[in-house]
Amino acid sequence: MPELPEVEVVRRGLEAHVLDRQITSVDVHHPRAIRRHIPGATDFAARIVGTHFTAAQRRGKYLWLELSSGAAVLAHLGMSGQMLVQPAAAAPEKHLRVRIAFTGDPELRFVDQRTFGGLSVEDVVTVDGTVLPVPVAHIARDPMDPKFDLTAAVTALRAKRTEVKRALLDQTVVSGIGNIYADEALWRVKLHWSRATDTLSAAKARALIEAATEVMSEALHVGGTSFDALYVNVNGQSGYFDRSLAAYGQEGLPCPRCGRPIRREPFMNRSSFSCPRCQRT
């Protein structure tokens, strides 16, 4: 699932191509793509056509486009959702789910092979001076937010009384960090994922969040992490941070720091990767 850097890459592309252009038509090609919009496809289109997008926004892994009507189109990318900017004359993608046309080229297409993602029109609320779609209102600020409070995040992380990786993935503690960048941050600060949060010093917890921020910034610089063709930016291009990963997905390969083979362990129906020497339990 895309994490903060991948979603930010998409947000920047949308900001460059789809703002301030009147929406002329909306075609829903698959009902699952708007299943979170309970009134259905006709209402979804009616609430968008005739308006325009005023801003492309993100909090953590959540992405939305603000509408001139005051509502927002919230995009759930899921495992394979793509927001593509394409010429109207371009052939439709095999897994095209929603097409949004504007006055003039290009148009916006939501493509989703596995149909785990989707779009919905949402009302907005103001939380701590920030306008958010209602489903995102409970999500914590992410480390790249100018108003992110590192001290408060450290306190919240240490108070969770759980395994440190579970706390790091908790979007109400700090948003934007997923499985990939959690493993990379833990490797950088030499912590095993099962370490109890209440045994962390404030300094170690701070170092962990700073490491997560650092690794996500590095990933953003190269367009995010792409393991297959399912994550791309709005132009269909893949990121290549996977070439720089030290732990995640590196099972059996030597640890870049000590040379011991990276191990894979079960974690929350997924996997966690770490170095058995550098990150001891």
Image: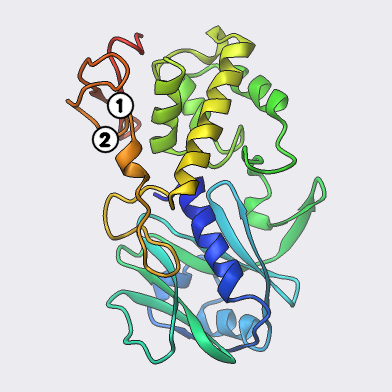
**Figure check: 74 above or below 281:** below
SS category of the residue bearing label 2: loop
Q: Position of residue 11 (x, y in %)?
A: 56, 61
The residue at the point 81 percent across, 45 percent down is 128
The residue at the point 26 percent across, 35 percent down is 249
Which numbered marker is on residue 98?
Answer: none
Q: Position of residue 66 (x, y in %)?
A: 68, 68
| Residue at the extreme right | 129
- Report the Cα–Cα distance between label 2 and label 1: 7 Å
- The quarter of the picture where residue 185 lies is top left
Left or right of residue 264, residue 212 in this image:
right
The residue at the point 34 percent across, 37 percent down is 244
Pick the residue in front: 3 or 113: 3
Left or right of residue 229, residue 261 in this image:
left
| Callout 2 touching callout 1 (CB < 8 Å) | yes
SS category of the residue bearing label 1: strand
Pick the residue in front: 47 or 59: 59
Pick the residue in front: 31 or 61: 61
Left or right of residue 160, residue 249 in this image:
left
Residue tagged 2: 249
Query: Along the polypeptide, which appears first: circle 2 or circle 1?
Result: 2
- The quarter of the picture where residue 92 lies is bottom left
The residue at the point 46 percent across, 18 percent down is 189
- Mark 1: amino acid: Phe
Which scheme is used to colour this image of the protein?
rainbow
Q: Position of residue 61 (x, y in %)?
A: 53, 49
Residue tagged 1: 273
- Mark 2: amino acid: Gly
